[in-house]
Image (spheres, rainbow, N blue to C red):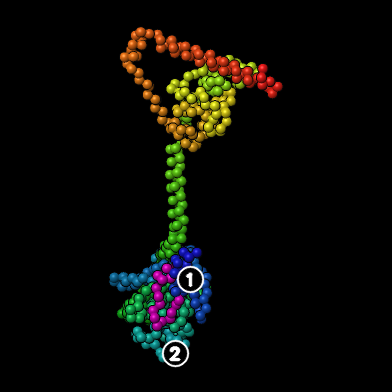
Amino acid sequence: MLLPLLLLLTAASAVPLAPAGTHHDPWWTRLGLFGTRHGSFAVDYGMPQNGDGWFWNINGWSLAESELSVVDQDPIQTFTVRPALFGAHIVSSPGLLGHLLPLNSFTVHDNASHDLTIPYPLSKENTGCPPLRVPDGHPRPSMNESWLALIIRGDCGFDEKVRQAQSLGARAAVIGGQAPPPGGVDELIAMSAPYSRDISIPAVYITHTSYIKLLNLIIASNTSTSGLRTVSVVLGPEETWAWWSPILSFAILLLLPSIMTLITLLVHRIRAARHAARQRAPGDVVRALPVRVWTGVVWVSEKDWLASHPHGVSHSSDPPTPEPELVEGAPKWFDNQAECAICLSSFARGDRVRVLPCSHIFHVEEVDGWLLNRRKVCPICKADVTHPVPRQPQTHTDPEHASGSNSTHPGTASSEGTERRWWQRVLRRVRERGQSGAATATERTPLLS
């Protein structure tokens, strides 16, 4: 809430102040937001009478600049002007060509009794405040002639001066500032008016220094029109970008925090997505991990299980159980895993499980979702599935004892291994028969036989 007010006060402090001792305009008038008339404030809603865009008068906001060039001088002299917030606006090149005439060179106030003399003194008032009249028999510019009125600020409002020049036939009004006080600044201001819908000619503001220079050029000029001394000038088109510049500046200042926040969030989301992608396991790596099937007694490969169960799991008649497939390098606790650590459900006959490199097993659907969408590590031991687990070093025996044993009993090791595997198969079959018998027991089966 405070940011727009702060920006408004900052813009107000940058608007040129009216010179002391002259007609004082409040800062909101110089800013171009409001106009004043008889102590009351009103928004200037006057729209241009001609021009190529609606943006020439957005609530009276204007910081545009243009140029006034004296073209009958060698070299051409150019003065910077600021267009008014009301009236028409020049938007096409080369601009408005015409003769520059001070109003006091052929008009007097309606209540004045003195006559005009040419050349007129510089001390004569040239405020252009109505009502003005042209003395009888005095030369005046033709109504079909293109001329611009030169006026000085003071004694009445800007709209009254421009309206008076328009009634006399001027194509535009050039209003000069008054002399600044000692230590004051002679700057351009944005002219505003609350009641200006009837004004159809352009109006521009020039500094007091430029006003005096133009007067001196007219006095020293050898050019005349309709018997009046003048200079030929061109009022150039306004800079369109200058109208948009303050609006864009305010928009950028207001939107900059939001834009920076969005950029920060976007960068954060991109980095988070890349980090999450690095944490997930590739699909080909996951699909390459072995799959086992629980037979009720041991784990067998999925291929052998499908070969022995062509029609799926049958509860009425159990087909022969395939021989267990030994997992190379599997720890002793591998066959003792009875439940999935993800869903916390015990393995059932025919369940498909994925064997991770660390030898932990999980249901295929659950562990694949974890590895592909979450992390590429084992949910239990956090081992990375994309890296092989280093094998445990084999236990080294005494070379002499080993060589002696091998030399005296060359077939002892192989016979012991065969005997151990035979006993394992026997015990496994006994355990399978016991479990199958327990599976057929019902609630009517006695606890003791």
Look at the numbered disc 2 and give the secondary structure of its residue: loop
Neighbours of disc 1 within 10 Å: few (<14), some (14-19), many (20+): some
- Residue 211 appears at what percent x and percent y? 36, 77
- Residue 51 appears at what percent x and percent y? 47, 66
Judge from the rendering whether residue 215 lies leftward or rightward of residue 377; answer left or right: left
- Residue 375 appears at what percent x and percent y? 47, 36
From what the image shows, is residue 224 above or below residue 310?
A: below
Mark whose residue sits in front, 1 or 2: 1
Marking on residue 33:
1
- Residue 13 appears at what percent x and percent y? 41, 71
Amino acid on which disc 2 is placed? Ala
The residue under the point 39% across, 68% down is: 66
Marking on residue 112:
2
Q: Nearer the viewer, residue 412 or 160?
A: 412
Q: Is residue 143 visible?
A: no
Look at the numbered disc 1 and give the secondary structure of its residue: loop
Amino acid on which disc 1 is placed? Leu
Residue 253 is a magenta residue: no
Q: Nearer the viewer, residue 348 or 137?
A: 348
Q: CA distance from mark 1 to mark 2?
A: 37 Å
